[in-house]
Structure formats: structure tokens, C-alpha cells
Amino acid sequence: MAYKILLKVIFFLFLSLNTFSNVLYDNEGLVITDIELNIYKDFYFKYHNSEINDANSLKDLVLIKNVIRDLKENNSNFISKIDNELTGKFGKDILKNETILNFYRFSRIRDEFIYNYFRNELSVEEIENIFMNLSELNLPISENNCLVISKIINFKDNKEFINNFFFNLKNNTNNFEVKINGFKYDVCIDKVRYYEIEQLIVSYIRSQTDKEFEYFVYEKTRN
């Protein structure tokens, strides 16, 4: 809801100020104005909770516009799919401002590299390494479907749990189990804890796919 309100405010400002914009970049049909730059900086801050300067904002906008233009020409079905996802999430207002629309498009394209790595390349050994780099991975165990907690166990080096977690992760299930001293226990992972672990894995995959994505982006820019 907050993002939808923000979008409406930015759209209004964009329409009000667009006629007074100054061109900052104009090359091979790709034009970027100071209004777009300011919208990008403002939205970048709200999305990432960190500031970005003018030079990096302009660089981002050039790269983003080049990538989107190339995909529109060579893979328009993919762009249409992304736009349908975005309108389903944010409503049709998202289509009214190209700067914000392209920001989300570009983020979604980046996510595709993460999804692809997760589906096709992520291994249980990588999950094991991620967990081993933690100081601890303390999780409660239970004998009765997590109704009563038996005790807390550090699972960072427990290969049985790691294999079980990997299976659940890849199959989108949540049947976390482990045997300890011959007894089977449920490993109790609530939504908050699961999200924290999931974000560690996403961060790892992002780092693994950075070079591939950068190559993709700059190839589109050169085309």
C-alpha cells in the first residue's frame, strides 16, 4: 500500500514537472532528463534505504534503459510477462512512469538470474558452506510437531539437517526433521527464522551471479 501511494505521488510530480526538464544524456535515441534522474534517486533511496549520487544514478539509468530497450526488441514476451506481474502487484499506475517501471523491470530481470541459479546450480555443499560460515545456527527441536520444545540445538555442522533443509528448500516444503541419538525430532523453524536463512542464501546466490549479470547488462549496452 505504501508503495502504491508513493507511486501516485511520483506520477503527479512527474506530470507536473516534465515540461521543465533538462536533458542530461542523449545518445542513439536514449534520452535521460534531470526529472528522471531525481525520480530515480528518490525511488532508489526508498527501495534500498541508501542514497545514490547523480553520477551513479545516471550510469544506472543508461544501463537500465539499454537493457530494457534491447529486451523489448529481442524478447518482448519476457518484458510483457514482467509487466503483467508488476501490474498484478502494484496496479496499472505502475505503467504510467517509465523510470519507476524500468526500475522494477530491471530488478525483476536481476532476480531471474537468482532464480535460475537456485533451480539449476545450487548444491547442498553450498548450503553446507553457508551454514558453516555462521557463528551458530541454533534451532529448537520437538517430539510433537513443535507443540512443545524439547531443547535448542546448534545445526550449523549437522549434515543430516543440512540435507533435509536443502531438500525442503528445493521442493518448497517445510518438513524439517532430524534424528538425534536414534530419536526423530521435528526442527522448528518459524517464518521469521526461515526468512533470515533464506536471505542468507539469496545473498550468496546474488554474489555468485554478479559477474554473469554484469556481463549480460554490458552486452546489452554494447548491442
Image (cartoon, rainbow, N blue to C red):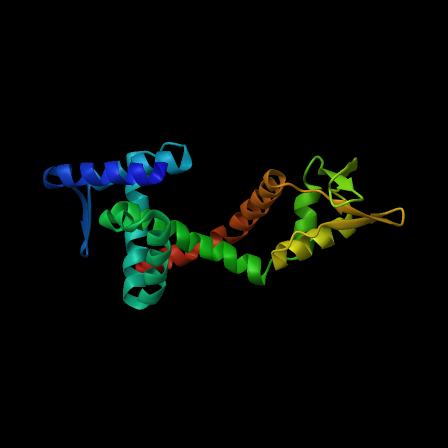
Residue 216: % across, % down:
41, 58
Task: Name the image quarter holding residue 10.
Answer: top left
Q: Residue at x 60, y 41 (%)?
A: 191
Task: Name the image quarter holding residue 45.
Answer: top left
Whether residue 37 is visible to the viewer of this picture, yes or no, is no
Left or right, 212 with respect to 124, comes to: left
* Vertical relation: 69 (above or below) 195: below
* Vertical relation: 197 (above or below) 85: above
Q: Nearer the viewer, residue 173 or 144?
A: 144
Q: How many marks?
A: 0
Q: Residue at x 42, y 56 (%)?
A: 215
Residue 223: % across, % down:
30, 62
**The N terminus lies in quadrant:** top left
Whether residue 50 is visible to the viewer of this picture, yes or no, is yes
Q: Nearer the viewer, residue 39 or 32?
A: 39
Q: Residue at x 62, y 43 (%)?
A: 194
Q: Residue furthest left?
A: 19
Residue 14: % across, % down:
19, 40
Residue 53: % across, % down:
32, 33
Q: Residue at x 28, y 42 (%)?
A: 58
Q: Nearer the viewer, residue 162 or 63?
A: 162
Q: Nearer the viewer, residue 127 or 53?
A: 127
Left or right, 84 with respect to 19, comes to: right
Q: Residue furthest right?
A: 181
* Vertical relation: 16 (above or below) 93: above
